[in-house]
């Protein structure tokens, strides 16, 4: 059974498996902002990525002579969460290491996600705690899909408040970053833009990202925190736009498989914590 949050405008449903945001109903606009899974397009709605982000070319990662057979995007999206506290507009969830996770990643950890609704949107806070006696390295990300008419209404754009490096196009779910990188503040969502895969942007920490309709109205605003990367992804012909604030990226095509060489890995000492946030604001008229 999903957990539900609500206020005078919004109603959220969050699944206990993977803490996946399944619905974000907006009574003012009479619409669900979250993509609904489809077999022929994308079978998720808003997945949690941990302890890795993206594709793993070697089927896992190596560290200090050990090999960790991790799945792409990690295992968190398949793990059960526990509710620590809930009120009408706030939900505190927690997941921690168990026998299943230590079989592929032998560390003890605890991850909290706190969801807070407000009158114009949603604030989400993630906190990772090292509850082990040894350090570990990880990456953290969120992969939400928004139900926006980006295919049926040409002319949507993504605008950053400051210049970012990119776009960098993924090829076969790998990502090469050239030394001489472009810099942009605006990205046009053309019809075949995602035919080869996602596009990544760097230097995205503390950025305000606006999704602007063909009418020039900002439909959605996403505020990042410490996340260095942002990925955009969709499926040609589908009214789906994934806006992904990420600490790291999918593997480079020449990646050697070593944990310490993977982009965006954060190292936590025993007892140490890592935290970042995302704020999403929705327009009042649905654009």
Image (cartoon, rainbow, N blue to C red):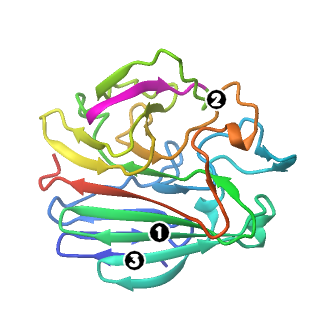
Residue named by callout 1: 113
Q: Relative to the observer, which residue lies in front, 180 or 283?
A: 180
The label number, if any, that marks residue 41 in the structure image: none
Does dot 1 land on a helix, a strand or a loop? strand
Q: Relative to the observer, which residue lies in front, 271 or 185?
A: 271
Residue 2 in sight in this render: no
| Mark 3 Cα-neighbour bin, 10 Å: few <14, some 14–19, many ≥20 | many
Q: Which residue corresponds to the image point at 63% horizontal and 63% vertical from the top-left?
A: 78
165 magenta-colored: yes
Residue named by callout 3: 91
Q: Position of residue 126 (x, y in %)?
A: 47, 64
22 magenta-colored: no
Does dot 3 land on a helix, a strand or a loop? strand
Q: Which residue corresponds to the image point at 58% horizontal and 60% vertical from the top-left?
A: 77
| Mark 1 Cα-neighbour bin, 10 Å: few <14, some 14–19, many ≥20 | many
Does the magenta stretch mainly form a helix, a strand or a loop?
A: strand
Q: Which residues are magenta?
A: 158-171
Q: Position of residue 270 (x, y in %)?
A: 67, 67
Residue named by callout 2: 252
């Amino acid at each position: 059974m999903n957990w539900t949050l609500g206020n005078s405008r919004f109603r959220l449903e969050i699944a206990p498996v993977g803490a996946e945001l399944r619905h974000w109903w907006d009574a003012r606009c009479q619409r669900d902002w979250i993509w609904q899974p489809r077999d022929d397009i994308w079978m998720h709605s808003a997945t949690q990525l941990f302890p890795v982000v993206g594709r793993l070319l070697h089927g896992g990662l190596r560290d200090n002579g050990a090999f960790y057979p991790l799945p792409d995007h990690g295992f968190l999206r398949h793990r059960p969460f526990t509710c620590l506290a809930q009120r009408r507009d706030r939900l505190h969830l927690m997941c921690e290491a168990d026998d299943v996770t230590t079989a592929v990643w032998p560390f003890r950890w605890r991850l909290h996600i706190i969801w807070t609704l407000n009158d114009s949107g949603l604030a989400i806070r993630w906190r990772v705690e090292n509850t082990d006696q040894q350090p570990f390295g990880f990456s953290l990300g969120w992969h939400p899909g928004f139900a926006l008419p980006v295919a049926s209404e040409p002319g949507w754009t993504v605008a950053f408040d400051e210049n970012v490096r990119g776009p960098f196009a993924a090829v076969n779910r790998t990502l090469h970053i050239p030394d001489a990188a472009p810099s942009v503040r605006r990205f046009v969502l053309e019809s075949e833009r995602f035919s080869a895969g996602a596009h990544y942007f760097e230097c995205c920490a503390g950025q305000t990202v606006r999704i602007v309709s063909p009418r020039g109205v900002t439909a959605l605003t996403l505020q990042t925190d410490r996340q260095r990367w942002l990925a955009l992804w969709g499926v040609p012909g589908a009214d789906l736009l994934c806006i992904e604030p990420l600490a790291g990226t999918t593997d480079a095509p020449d990646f050697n498989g070593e944990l310490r060489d993977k982009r965006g890995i954060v190292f936590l000492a025993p007892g140490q914590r890592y935290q970042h946030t995302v704020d999403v604001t929705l327009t009042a008229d649905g654009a």
